[in-house]
Image: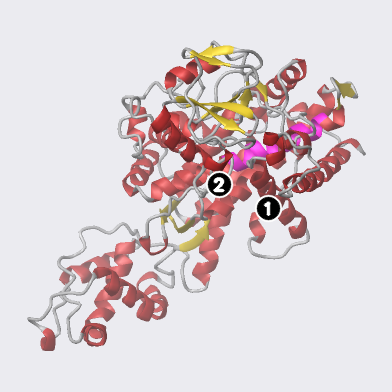
Amino acid sequence: MLAPQPSGALPIIGHLHKLGGKNPLCSTLASMADKYGPIFTIQLGKHPALVISNYDAVKECFTKNDIAFATRSKSAQGRYLAYNYATLSSSLYGTYWRNMRKMVIVELLSSRRLQTLKHVQIAEVDSFIKGLYEICKTEGENGQSVESCPTLVRDKVCYVLIWSWVTPHIANWFYGGTSISSWYQSGLSSCEAKRPHALLVTQLLSTCRLENPPHVRGRVESCPTLVRDKVCYVLIWSWVTPHIANWFYGGTSISSQSKVVISEWIEHLTLNVITQMIAGKRYFDWGKVGNDSDNEGKNKRIREMVKEFRCVAGKLVVSDLIGFPDWIDLTGQVKNMKRIGKDFDSLMASWIEEHKNPRKEIDSRDKLDFIDVMLSVIEDNTVLGHSRETIIKATSQNLILAGSETTATNLTWILSLLLNNRHVLKHAQEEINLQVGTERWVEDTDIKDLTYLQAIVKETLRLYPPAPLSVPHEAMEDCQVCGFHIPKGTRLFANLWKLHRDPSVWLDPEVFCPDRFLTTQASTDVSGQHFEFIPFGSGRRSCPGLTFAMQVIHLTLGRLVQGFELATPLDMPVDMAEGLGITMPKATSLEVVLTPRLPSQFYER
């Protein structure tokens, strides 16, 4: 018996016309699963494809049928972007793939190797945090922020000193005499600022009473708080801040907020980490944010190359699916792939030459980067059809794309969810305060004790897995999946986006709830052995970079949450629209307002 198939398949193209549109492919296939069940087939041109999205089907495909589905489909991406299937992720199942996976797991991404290169991760995260602080400091020197007192103190001081005078004017202007009213009901109950003068502010506020102006008493009580606050800020705050700061805080600005497109900063961070580990290269200088530099052109180019690669790698190529030769390139996709592949090849070749000629001196084996390691362990000039140089270039490229973009995308989703769920963010900060304190930074050795932080990461991986639709496998032989006959040559897609939202497994599956991983799902991890939750895949073709990704995510998130108060411009909710691509990034960039939480010396070390 064959698996169910949606109606409406057309000659030549099959169901391709049903897979377009503005929604991510995983979402479109999830809607089909709602109608046809968690196991169904679609026709992608001339190729049948099996789509699975429940525990039983996933377990059966990646255990009982793991070898049957262990190979990859041939594609234009594999030919032109992956050195003719030389990368680990694109290579066909066989001896070459086994040798490559062994090298990557044992020599490059083993716990021992990652430990020897841990200093790279730590140094980059340190620079990342310091760079964000420098932005706050720079804006502070321009009149906005250096070091903070509590936001509540800042707001109330502004209101007390100015609002009683400006109220009738703004009221008459906007509301025809309606008072903006006695908003201040009680004194400030506490003050977190440690400066002595902050106590004076507290005492001042506790004795203040603001009443409606005499000529409007008895009329409409108040205008919306948002209007009151924003008018006050826009008309007055930019002028009064330095005066109040000088008066109460000895010249230190009261606010320390800085607006940053954090998603871009995270992309720079993850790219810096992986390129340093691969080739000892940094492609973003945190000390020159916003400034021109000699290498800025080259640095910008590699970032553009990564984005271009991401864009074309996730697209369906018509010639692959219908069976046209590549030279019938109706959409120009193949031409674009060839160009991007050539650009990457030139970059990878230059890295290898720098490592070979002249051969650089290495103080110890622990300081070897990945290219050093590969040059030493790949001895033969040709390995099963690929030259040593091709293998090194393919592996380096694969690690850059898999190790930077997916990690950056996941961190961006984590912050987006935290900003829309401030109680979760506060809980994470409280846990860090309790387990780490405020006398030192979070270290990688602390992560095991930060169970709520780990739960936040898991819950984000559940809702937004790095690859919501798995890289397609292909059946090398006929097999059975949950009683359905699957012919040889059928492509397999595991819809992780749908799997992770299965209401038969997850309570309130659409709700962001990290606590589930401390209660009902406490034993569930990311290893790929819990088949209801496989953010990094499962079986032979699962992601070998799991440990590396989790290290970077946990350390970066821990430092950000510890070091800064996070908010959004105007306290608006984050737009959670999902973009298109193999990693399903956010449709829009994430902009945050940062306020340093720790004393300045922590950031300037």
In the image, residue 214 above or below residue 341 = below
Asked which secondary structure carries label 1, the reply is loop
| Callout 1–callout 2 Cβ contact below 8 Å | no
Visible residue check, residue 369:
no
Closer to viewer: mark 1 or mark 2: 2
Amino acid type at mark 2: Leu
The foreground one among 351 and 381 is: 381
Magenta stretch, main secondary structure, is helix
Please state the horizontal and vertical placement of residue 514, each as a whole percent of the image. Answer: 36, 35
Point 40% across, 46% down: residue? 418
Please state the horizontal and vertical placement of residue 551, each as a whole percent of the image. Answer: 55, 33
Visible residue check, residue 33:
yes
Asked which secondary structure carries label 2, the reply is loop
The foreground one among 112 and 110 is: 110
Could you give the CA–CA distance between mark 1 and mark 2, rounded to whole angstroms? Answer: 26 Å
Horizontal side of 24 relative to 340 (left or right) equals left
Tag shown at residue 434: none
Tag shown at residue 284: 1
Amino acid type at mark 1: Phe
Instruction: Say whether residue 161 is magenta.
Output: no
- Magenta residues, as a range? 391-406
Of all residues, the one furthest to the front in this rendering is 11
Please state the horizontal and vertical placement of residue 124, each as a whole percent of the image. Answer: 62, 45
Q: Which residue is mark 2?
A: 580
Horizontal side of 302 relative to 596 (left or right) equals right
The foreground one among 556 and 516 is: 516
Upstream in sequence: badge 1 or badge 2: 1
Point 75% across, 39% down: residue? 81
